[in-house]
Amino acid sequence: MSQERRTDPTKRVGTEAIERRRASAHGLGPAAEHERSQKALERRVAERTRELARANERLQAQVRESERAVHLQATLYRIAALGHGEGSNEAFYRSIHEAVGELLNAESFCIALVSDDGQWLDFPYYVDSSGAELLRRPMGRGMSEYAIRCAQTIRLEAEKISALIKQGEVDADTYGNPAVSWLGAPLMGARGVMGIVVVQSYRSDLHYTQQDAELLTFVSYQIANTLQRRQQAEALRILNAELEQRVLERTQELRRQIVVRERAQKQLKHQVMHDSLTGLPNRLYLRERLERALGALKREPTRRFALLYLDVDRFKLFNDGLGHGVGDEVLRIVSARMADCVRPPDIVGRLSGDEFAVLLENCPQPSSACLVAERIQARMAQAIEIGGRQLHVSVSIGIAMSRPLYQTVDQLLHDADTALYRAKAAGRHRFVLFDESLHVSSVNVLDLEQQMRDALEKSEFEAYFQPIVRLADGGVTGYEALIRWRHPQLGVLGPGQFLPAAEATGLIEMIDWHMYRLAFQAASALLGRDKILNINISMGHFHSRDFPQRLLNLTAQAGVALDQLCIEVTESSLLSDPDAAAEILGRLHEAGVRIALDDFGTGYSSLSHVHRFPLRTLKIDRSFIAPLGQAAQQRSMAIVSAVLSLARSLDLNVVAEGVENTAQRDALLSMGCTHGQGFLFGRPAPLGTGASLRAGEP
């Protein structure tokens, strides 16, 4: 109640009487007294009205505060309830945004979380009235990072933000679009600041107040707690899921073991029957299929199949020269290409090393097998690229058609293998179809192989020497060492009678080394100080990287001067592996050994060899010399003349092979050829038959 209501009425009357007496004392009349009383009353009414207005404002403020508190409490409960929901994170953050928006202006609102390693600031929810988007950025000097570093609620206006930028606390580029008013509250977790909730305004008529800051602070606590509960709930969900998975795994363990056991048995069977490197059927699997095919052939004699036996040419060079890893990759690629060339039920199998086999189940004609062989060789013609290096791989193929006389798989494999060796002996990259003549030949080769092994042990191979002379005067300038076999039953055999078999059986290198030792032993008595000793190199030596050093060691032991040694190579041997040949010949050339290209003009690309290899001499093949001095000599003279011209331009020596009469010699002299070799000057003879070694002897 007001003060007037609490005053005693009798006292009020007394006061008015006193006032009237005072007025009378001053000579005031009743009218003046009434006016004065009226004003006093108005003052009292106005004062009371103001008191009532203030009381009403206080009451309304209390009501608003109560409503605000109720609203805040409801919002906090609402946010807390979100922690127990199962909605998506996007829905969760959107609900928080809506809740905060009911308390203060949140047109531009975001929640940022510090990554576990503290290096990144993730924005799982980002809404900006300017249209900007942000998902993640490294922890830097943004406004959010500043508030996180301060670990307290920050309310800033544009001027203060500019000041922070000038102080280096905030980076303008990281901060982004400048806000008129910015408000951020840290999200405090169990281990410190876990993130921040931010609202900002770009409007000049909207500024956040201290009361807004307090509100956002309260809300941030609840958001942080809710986030942690959701994270804990998610961790618990994951844990429960893992537990359920473990229970499921344990429940299924017996079934899994059964499945694994069955799979292991199948895998073991597959491994037993397949090659681990290429995945192809192995020899065991192939034999099983061949046995079935032979059984079907016995039941149906008209049914025919074919077996292709394949060998990768020069594989040892790839494997030894470039490493086993490259060799394995070559085998994998080759096997895949072979498999591409056949269709089920035909199969490709790996027998061992670089040997493969193809079984053509239904192959009525040999021509069908030959077509498959051609298809395989054409597929192999494409270069293989391994480790930036292009490799040119070819295969030799032996083909055996099914025949009623085959009783065992070994017989079939043997005949296919025989055809394969004939293909390799013919120069590789070929296929040969087995027939009865090959059977007879293979028996002869096997017999001859044993005889040659015996000949090596008994020193039946001998070195013969044929002189190389100056055509002008017949003076001897050197000798070519040639091999002969003094066979105990057949007499002296020339190289053409046994060297092809030596190459087919792999004995050629052993025979070569035996020949080199014989030739070097005779060198001191044969050469003197100025003559040259020529020896022949088989293509197999180009597959051995230690060949140059081994040859140099042998010359040193025998006392042969390197500048008196010339090695002769044929074009076909160079073609077997040009890269390896160039390397080996280069090493010998650097040591001082001379290099001669034998049978020049009979190869596929003679001129290219002249430039690629370190040659010193060209030996013109006897096929170009034989027509000289005859009526039809024009073409041969043109070829020989061209060779001589080429040799002069490249500073190469030339030796004409197979000079047998004076007409040929004179024709060569007329064209400017200076050196020759042939029966006109001396037949090949062993050391000790001096007459045969002198130039000019028939």
Image: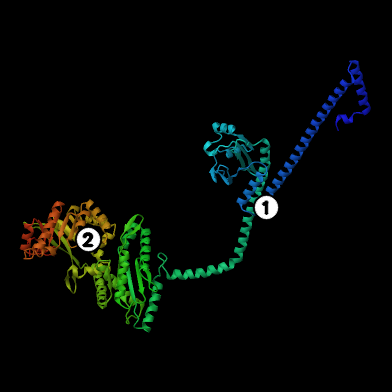
Q: Secondary structure at mark 1?
A: loop
The vertical placement of 546 against 67, above or below, is below
Q: In x, y percent, where is residue 382?
A: 31, 62
The outermost residue toward the front is 31
Query: What x and y, as percent, mark residue 279?
Result: 41, 66
Residue drawn 86% across the image and 33% down it = 1
C-beta proximity under 8 Å, tags 1 and 2:
no
Say above or below: 166 vs 572: above
Q: Which residue is mark 1?
A: 84
* 127 horizontally vs 643: left or right: right
Q: Is residue 40 visible?
A: yes
**Most foreground residue, 246 or 154:** 154
Three-letter code for the amino acid on which mark 2 is drawn? Ile
Quadrant of the drawing holding the C terminus: bottom left
- Between the C-alphas of marks 1 and 2, the distance is 89 Å
Front label number (1 vs 2) = 1
Q: Position of residue 90 (x, y in %)?
A: 60, 51
Q: Nearer the viewer, residue 106 or 162?
A: 106
Q: Secondary structure at mark 2?
A: loop
Amino acid on which disc 1 is placed: His
Does residue 211 appear left or right of residue 606 in this picture?
right
Q: Is residue 693 visible?
A: no
**Apparent side of residue 47 relative to residue 594 in the rendered image (left or right):** right
Query: Does residue 542 lie above or below 9 as drawn?
Result: below
Residue drawn at the location 37% of the way across and 60% of the way down: 329
**Image side of residue 657 versus residue 295, left or right:** left
Quickly name the residue at label 2. 537
Depth order, front residue of 283/435? 435
